[in-house]
Amino acid sequence: MIMRKKILVTGANGQLGMELQQLAPGNPGFDFVFTTRDQLPLNDLNAISRFISEHNPQYCINCAAYTAVDKAESEKDLAYRVNAEAPGVMANACKENHIHFIHISTDYVFNGNGTSPYKEDDQTDPVNLYGASKLDGEKLVMENDPNSIIIRTAWVYSEFGKNFVKTMLRLMADKEQISVVSDQYGTPTYAADLAEAIMKIISTFENHTSTSPLTTHNGIYHFSNEGQISWYDFAVAIKDIIGSSCKVNPITTPEYPTPAKRPAYSVLDKTRIRDTFNVPIKDWKASLAVCLEKIKNATK
Ligand SMILES: NC(=O)c1ccc[n+]([C@@H]2O[C@H](COP(=O)([O-])OP(=O)(O)OC[C@H]3O[C@@H](n4cnc5c(N)ncnc54)[C@H](OP(=O)(O)O)[C@@H]3O)[C@@H](O)[C@H]2O)c1
């Protein structure tokens, strides 16, 4: 009998978790265990090791996170527990049980003063509490299990959950004009593309040979789609693709104050993930069109 390898996925109902669920049927060689907040509340640190040992997977993908960037400013303890302590405990449990740990982090670990795409070893300096909690998570993960893989991503959207694309679709349907920040630059990430990248990494691990030891693949990687745009550009592209008549006005960051500061520039350099795992990096607009088509078909 062929033993299927088990992949444990946290944050099953989040954007990335849902996209991994879409990929599960196409990966019959793996037995996926998708866990929700109810099954594994990450704020309950004692439950984490027990849960991981009980399921004893070969891979653990941590898609769960405290992602409410503005709310994190006033919920510091919870944000740190979920984004820093919990991944640290997970990494420890993965090391003890010889599990490959794949953890997801963020472009918000950078201060945004850069002008060229951020590389993995560039200086981190988060400007908000969410970014600081995620950076602490990265550190605890690598301290507790140096064989872990951390993927920093940015501006994630999908047909599932709450995100910029879905907010824009709602606003464009309701309003004649909207205003969107035009002085913050980055690159969107279609969660479906990130989910595929993660499965590509796992398949590389599965197909490894003794001449390419897995330990050389550990560490931090950057992944987003390709390109560099502002939130305003993103909104205009959504408007153009869906053919909306809503007017999109560019505004500056001070005109749209938020509790948490955002980095002005957070484009990620994807060279390392592309070269190491042969992960394709799709153009941001092409992926946006795919997602919008899916949303359109789902609402028909
Ligand atoms: N969204 C972005 O723009 C963005 C940008 C950069 C990096 N990232 C990172 O990418 C990863 C995936 O993000 P995403 O967009 O898929 O996030 P998401 O849609 O907000 O999903 C987060 C998931 O975490 C779960 N969760 C939150 N608190 C929890 C807790 N205490 N215990 C257990 N589960 C908990 C949520 O559960 P419920 O479904 O019950 O709420 C949800 O399923 C995260 O690590 C995030 O930090 C995201």
Image (cartoon, rainbow, N blue to C red):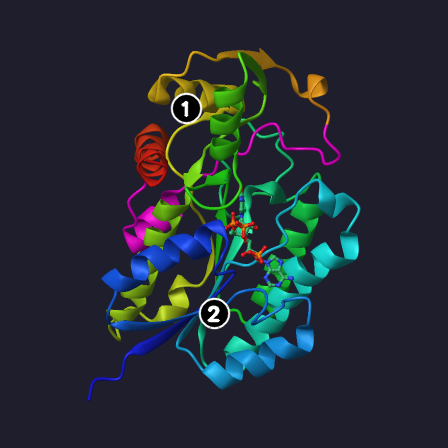
Q: How crowded is mark 2: few (under 14 residues within 10 Å), some or many (20 or more)?
A: many
- Residue drawn at point x = 61 percent, y = 32 percent: 112
| 190 and 120: which is toward the camera | 190
Verify whether residue 6 appears in magenta: no
Q: Do the residues labelled 1 and 2 touch (CB within 8 Å)?
A: no
Residue 297 on image: x %, y %: 30, 37
Q: Is mark 2 within 8 Å of ligand 1?
A: no
| 179 and 139: which is toward the camera | 179
From the image, tell me which residue sits under label 1. Answer: 238
Query: Identity of the amino acid at label 1?
Result: Ile
Verify whether residue 271 appears in magenta: yes
The outermost residue toward the left is: 1
The outermost residue toward the front is: 300
From the image, tell me which residue sits under label 2. Answer: 147
* Nearer mark to the viewer, of 1 and 2: 1
- Residue 58, numbered label: none
Q: In this view, does 292 lie above or below 223?
A: above
Q: How crowded is mark 1: few (under 14 residues within 10 Å), some or many (20 or more)?
A: many
Q: In this view, does 166 lie above or below 106?
A: above
Q: Is the magenta stretch mostly helix, strand or loop?
A: loop
Query: Identity of the amino acid at label 2?
Result: Asn
Q: Is residue 114 above or below residue 42?
A: above
Residue 262, picture quadrant: top right
- Residue drawn at point x = 70 percent, y = 38 percent: 127
Q: From which residue to which does the magenta span run?
A: 258-281
Q: What element carries label 2?
A: loop
| 160 and 228: which is toward the camera | 160
Q: What element carries label 1?
A: helix
The outermost residue toward the bottom is: 1
- Residue drawn at point x = 44 percent, y = 77 percent: 99
Residue 275 on image: x %, y %: 31, 49
**Would residue 290 be found to the left or right of residue 121 on screen?**
left
